[in-house]
Each structure stands twice: as C-alpha cells, then as structure tokens.
Image: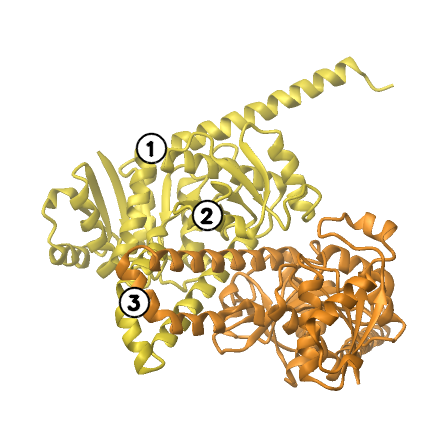
Chain colours: A orange, B yellow
C-alpha cells in the first residue's frame, strides 16, 4: 500500500481541486491510501461531494491553520505550525505517509519541509525539479527551479546526482544522461560556476554528457539538465510566458474574421489535440529533492487534472523507491570523493613537499 | 545620407543573403548608401544579380579573408585581419560608414568590434541587446544576451543605461521603463548580483520599475529588461527551442490524418498570419552596445527578409543618433555618481571620524 498525504488547503483553489483530484487518482489505484489534511469538516464535505467509490481509501487529518499563497516564510514558520502543510509533512516524517503533495506557496513548502523532514546526509540544499516536454514526446527533468539562487559547484553536483536519481526512479532509465546548462557546448564556454561544476561532474560516475544549451531542453538531448535556481526559475517563467503569448495570439488570429472563425471550427479537433500534447498540466508536479521524505509541489493554479498528475508523480516516486535511490546515489558520490581524497593523500605521502 | 557597411561574407549563407537584403533596403530609402565589404568580384556578381535600380547607392570594399562561423576568436584576431568583418568595422571607425551590420560569429564580431572601435568612455563591457515580441504587439528589449557571463552590479547598471538609450533612440520612447530580471517581484528576492544592482538602479535617473520575472518579457511590463549574459543567453536559446518545438508539433498535428490535412488547408491563411505575427525574423538585429560605433548583429541563419530587418534597425539607430544618446546617457550617470561621491565626501568632512 502507498500512503499519500495531501495538503488539501494549499494552492489558489484548495479543497475544490485537491480533494476531487485525490478521489480521481484513488479510483485508478486500489492500493493507494490518502491522508487528506485540512479543516476536518470542510474536507469531509468536499470528500462527500466527490463521491469516492471506496471511502476506506481516505482518512482525514484535522489542521486548523491555513497557509495563504502570500504569507511570508517567517510567519509560516513561526505562527502557522498547525497548518495543513505542517501536518501533511509531519505525517511523512512519522512514517504515517510515504509522500506529501501540496499546491501551496513554494517558498513556504520548501522551508517547512526542510524544517520538519531535514535534508539527506551529504546534501546541503534541497532542490526543485520538474519535467518539461521535449520534441521526443518525453520529458526533460530540469533542476534547480528556484530553491537556491546563489549556488556553488558542489551544490550543482548534488543537483545532478539528485536529478539523476529522480529520473532513474520515476522514469526507469538506468543511466540518465545529465547535461549542464550553459551558453555553448564547448568546454571553454560559460561562467565560473559552470566551468568548475563541469570539472566536478566529469569526475563522477554519473552519465555526464557535457554542456547543453537552452534549446537542448526541448530537443531532449539530456534526461536531466542542471542549473542554479536563479537561471532555472527565469527559464521556467520565460517559457511559461512565451507559451501563454503564443496561445493567446493563436486564438486572437482565429477570431479575427468570419472566415477565420469558420477555419477555427474546422481546425478545432486538430488544435485541441495539439493543446493536449502541449498541455503543461500533464507535466505538473515538481519534486522537492534532497529531503528525508518524498514531497511533490503542484503548481498553485493547478486544476483537478493538473493536481491529479502531481499526485500520480508522487505515487510513482514512492513505488520506484525514489528516496532509497537518491540516498544510494548520494552515498556513491560521497564514497568516490572520499576515495579520491585518500588517493590524493597517498600521493602526497609519496611526494612529500621539500 | 546614412552610410551602412555590410559584412557581406558573414553568416551561414553570406553573399546570397546579405547583398539582396541590402538591395531591398536601398530600394526603400534613397538616402541610404551601402559599403558592401567582401571579395570584390564575388560581391560585384551578387550585386548585379540583385539588380539594384540605383546602382550609385553601392560601393564595394575588397576584403580577401573570410571569417567562418566556427573560427576560434584568437585565430580571427591574429590571422584574419583582412576579413570582411574587419574592413567593415574599420569603415565605421574611420567614419566612412555610420554603422556596420554582420551576420558573422557573435564572439568574433564582439571581439573584433572591441578591438577596432573600442568601448565608450565609462563603459567597461559592451553588451548585446535584442528585441523580443510581447503581448502588446511591440518589442521588449533584453540585454545582455551573452557577451558577458560573469557580471558585477556596475556592469548591469551600464547595461540598463545602454538599453534605455537604445529604446529611446530606436523606438522614440522618452523614458523607457527599465526592469531588472529576477525570480520574484519583491525586493527581497533574487541572488546577490540582482539585489545589489537594484540598489544601484534606484539611485539613477533611469525609469527603473523594479524587478520583473521571465514572463514579464512577453507581457511587455518593461521596455528594457536587464540581466547578465549567462541568464540572457540561456533565456534566448530556451525560448527559441520552445518556439521551434511548438511550431513543429503544430505542423505534425495538422499532417496526422486526411481530416486534419483538410483542416490545415482551411486554416492556412490564419496560421500564416499567426506565423507572420510571431515571425522572429522581424525581430532580427541585435545591437552591440557600448562601442564607439553602431554595430548590429544579424542571426547567422538569417534569410534575406531577416537580414533586411537587421539593416533597417541599424539605419534607424543611426538616424535617431543612438551613439550620441548613449554617450549622453552614460555621461549623465557618471556625473550623477560623481556628484554623489562629492556629497558623500562633503558629509565626511562635516562629520570627521573621531
């Protein structure tokens, strides 16, 4: 059985989205159990409205506080300890749940998750990873998307390792190709951060394919693309902005004249299929990696379909032992680095300084 | 009269694109004169093929060397001093031309332009700026797009000033709104670089509107968006990659079945109009700012239409006195900073340390 704690109050819409989404996913998988966390009466009502066919798949955990999307992080940490987000994460910590899914404020979720779950041994900073659609019809996992704005090469190395473990676990790819986001493919390109990171990555057992550029994300050149959280967040928001503009311009063009309106009617099934293929709701569900627990973050504006995808990703991560695989990955890298240090020391002993 | 030097051999296609584009633009503006730089016989042949109606609008400057798109910068600087790029830039330096347009390798163009033209007083690093389409149907000018990968807050301040002068000159907007690219609108957001840059920008006479996010570029929130060259380049290539993927997926969907092919025929005029609106060729022509001369860089893969747009942008920049306005902008900022320093020193004199 897989047990998932849902922060039912999080996101722009809260209960009317989170509860029906949980019910949808529960219908698909009989071995799934949900801990619905939020104001108990309200959750109970929402659950009844959603008419689950197997009510025993759900338990309710009462939480009186609600975190708003614009609550400052220090307020959340100090004064909202009884929030649905806190309770859902406590359920993970106390092993009453295998994963937590929340559509709440990203900064708050990261801070509360770090506070309650703590980071894995060997990980300095958790990172946010998501999958973006590529031309191969698959997803490219990109991290960090904004948890860490000032990074060292060591942080990026940890991101690479965690991203690789995520793709291994969730997509079943044995040796995911890892690319380092840069402004050219050549090794001499880039800023100080990526140059040093590249050296570190080459020395690992990761399947590091070298530098990749922004368009490689959409070509599907690598399974995992690593960047610092500033670059990743700018990238994510820029492509969201471009996609919105393109979509609204296309609509505008189809509504311009009588002819174009008729053409729109004709083209509708095709455009709808296209929109479905490109639908970013299918890629909803960013993983918070590097924590002692599985946490997935849904887009705040997610609807029922989108939130269901985030739950599905969390389920897949638990089923494929994401946490265990990430731990192993980190340990392997730590061990190989320690061995290298030992070898270096032995060489130092052989060649003592004059 | 406006005189533009064209690096005819640059870009993926060279003469068959650059010369017809120059002829196209020359037909529109009788007061334009072109210096076509390249292997004289080949340029002469290309010019005859393009059949200009006023041949007196063209002079040819012979240049024996050609810079290839993948020539390393040190080879270009040391061994290709007789290239069409060099000669075109020398024409600007010696005031035989008012601007230079090249589709050659960006790194080489920046290096050669810095070497031949030098940077303006008060500018440490030239930057690359281009205009991206936004939802308002206008362009958002973004810089730096890759000339400078490791930047200080002072560099970003200079970019803001140069970008503001570019928009003033080319688009005729008196007080362009300047935004700082960040991962949130709030002042507390961002990495060290943007936080310090924000402080500097607030102290200038620029119309600084604060932080903007990636999607603001496409919303048209600011006229000028400033970022370091690493972020700018990743951003540019990512949106190019996304646009390509969307366009090829749309095509694929329309070719999937007989029905969708008929729908495609119906929708063709609408889709064509949409493609025209979104056509990135219309936004071709990045400005190399901060040099003692007007230089525009065309996309290497530009066709005749795209290269014509780059020439038009260069013409507009000359006509609207970009260089003069940039100089004034830099001087104004330098003066205000000196005044601040003087005030600070005077305050120090009033409050001597104990």
Q: Residue furthest top?
A: B350
Specify whether residue A326 is in view: yes
Circle 3 crowding by C-alpha within 10 Å: few under 14, some 14–19, many from 20 = many
| Mark sitting on residue B267 | 3
Q: Where is residue B252 in the image (x, y as percent from the top left)?
A: 38, 76
**Camera-nearest residue between B13 and B141:** B141
The reply, left or right, for residue B349 in relation to residue B212 is: right
What is the chain letter for disc 2?
B
Question: Is disc 2 in contact with disc 1, using a CB cutoff of under 8 Å?
Answer: no
Q: Can residue A118 be seen in this view?
A: no
- Please tell me which residue lies in front, B58 or A8: A8
Q: Residue B315, image x and y in percent?
A: 29, 40
Question: In this figure, what is the number of numbered marks?
Answer: 3
Q: Do labels 2 and 1 share a chain?
A: yes
Residue A134 image offset from top left, x and y in percent: 51, 73
**Label placed on residue B128:** 2
Q: Distance between the residues labelled 3 and 2?
A: 38 Å
Quarter holding residue A338 = bottom right
Q: In this view, does A57 lie to the left or right of A225?
A: right
Q: Which residue is labeled 1 in the image? A: B320
| Residue B200, above or below A49 | above
- The C terminus of chain A - image quarter: bottom right
Q: Residue A349 is drawn in which quadrant?
A: bottom right
Question: Mark 2 falls on what kind of element?
Answer: strand
Sequence-first tag of 2 and 1: 2
Which is closer to the viewer, label 3 or label 2?
A: 3
Q: Position of residue B17 (x, y in %)?
A: 24, 59
Q: Is residue B8 left or right of residue A206?
A: left
Disc 3 with disc 2 on a shared chain = yes
Callout 1 and callout 3 share a chain:
yes
Mark 3 — on which chain does it sit? B
């Amino acid at each position: 059985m897989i047990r998932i704690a849902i922060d039912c109050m999080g996101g722009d819409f809260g209960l009317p989205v989170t509860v029906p989404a949980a019910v949808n996913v529960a219908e698909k998988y009989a071995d799934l159990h949900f801990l619905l966390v939020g104001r108990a009466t309200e959750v109970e009502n929402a659950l009844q409205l959603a008419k689950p066919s197997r009510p025993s798949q759900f338990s309710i955990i009462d939480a009186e506080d609600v975190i708003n999307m614009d609550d400052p992080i220090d307020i959340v940490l100090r004064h909202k300890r009884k929030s649905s987000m806190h309770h859902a994460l406590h359920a993970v910590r106390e092993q009453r749940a295998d994963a937590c899914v929340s559509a709440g404020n990203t900064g708050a979720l990261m801070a509360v998750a770090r506070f309650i779950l703590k980071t894995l041994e060997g990980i300095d900073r958790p990172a946010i990873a998501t999958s973006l659609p590529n031309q191969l019809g698959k997803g490219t996992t990109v991290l960090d998307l904004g948890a860490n704005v000032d990074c060292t090469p060591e942080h990026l190395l940890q991101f690479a390792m965690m991203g690789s473990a995520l793709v291994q676990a969730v997509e079943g790819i044995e040796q995911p190709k890892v690319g380092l986001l840069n402004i050219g493919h050549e090794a001499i390109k880039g800023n100080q951060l990526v140059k040093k990171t590249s050296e570190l990555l080459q020395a690992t057992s990761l399947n590091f394919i070298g530098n990749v550029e922004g368009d490689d994300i959409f070509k599907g050149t690598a399974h995992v693309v690593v960047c610092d959280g500033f670059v990743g967040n700018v990238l994510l928001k820029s492509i969201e902005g471009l996609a919105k503009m393109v979509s609204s311009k296309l609509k505008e063009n189809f509504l311009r004249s009588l002819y174009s309106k008729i053409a729109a009617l004709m083209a509708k099934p095709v455009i709808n299929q296209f929109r479905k293929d490109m639908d970013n709701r299918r890629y909803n569900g960013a993983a918070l990696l590097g924590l002692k627990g599985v946490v997935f973050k849904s887009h705040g504006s997610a609807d029922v379909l989108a939130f269901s995808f985030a739950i599905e990703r969390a389920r897949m991560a638990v089923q494929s032992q994401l946490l265990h695989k990430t731990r192993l990955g980190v340990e392997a890298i730590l061990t190989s680095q320690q061995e290298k240090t030992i070898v270096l020391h032995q060489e130092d002993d052989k060649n003592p300084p004059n």
